[in-house]
Amino acid sequence: MTLTIHLNGKAQAVAADPETPLLYVLRDELGLNGAKYGCGLGQCGACTVQLDGKAIFSCITPVGAVGDRAVRTVEGLGSLDHMSPLQQAFLDEQAAQCGYCIAGMLMRAQALLDVNPHPGEAEIRSHMQPNLCRCGTHMRILRAIRRVAGQSGKGAAA
């Protein structure tokens, strides 16, 4: 079946069963490898993308459920030549160790910053809680988000 999804600002035709997880369509059909397969159960966040600006687990979201809503992946945030402020902050804070979780972390963090450009520490931590980093770089990830949110880091747990 051919479906049309709105991906990173462009209409994209995909040939997929409507029950196919969005993650598989992104990676296998469209060649967008930013979102990763982690657990397949929506429990780790490695597959996080945005759907109409909200962070979702693409491993448990059927492509048929996307409808006319906008899908945004890490490939839609920026590029090596033109990084988004959040991507640059992740680089500056050396927030990636193995890098497996980073695309999901970026997408979840960007969803928060798009709604609230200056979230407080508790809001950042609460919002980021569903995404896991197996390497333990959570503190660097939080510093990167605070940097973009305009927080100096004073009073926040490093």
Image (cartoon, helix red, strand yellow):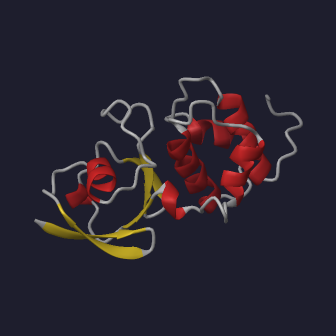
> Which quarter of the image is occupied by the N terminus?
bottom left
Q: Position of residue 117 (x, y in %)?
A: 70, 59
- Report the label total: 0
User: Who's the residue at 28% across and 43% down the image?
Assistant: 60
State whether residue 120 appears in this view.
no
Examine the image and state in which quarter residue 71 appears: bottom left
User: Who's the residue at 19% across and 50% down the image?
Assistant: 20
Q: Position of residue 5 (x, y in %)?
A: 30, 69
Q: Height in image: 73 above or below 4?
A: above
Q: Height in image: 28 above or below 105?
A: below
> Which quarter of the image is occupied by the C terminus?
top right
Q: Position of residue 46 (x, y in %)?
A: 45, 38
Examine the image and state in which quarter residue 152 appears: top right
User: Who's the residue at 26% across and 57% down the image?
Assistant: 29
User: Who's the residue at 39% across and 31% down the image?
Assistant: 43
State whether residue 157 appears in this view.
yes
Examine the image and state in which quarter residue 47 appears: top left
Residue 42 falls left or right of residue 130: left
Residue 126 falls left or right of residue 131: right
Depth check, front residue: 52 or 45: 45
Q: Position of residue 24 (x, y in %)?
A: 27, 48
Depth check, front residue: 94 or 104: 94
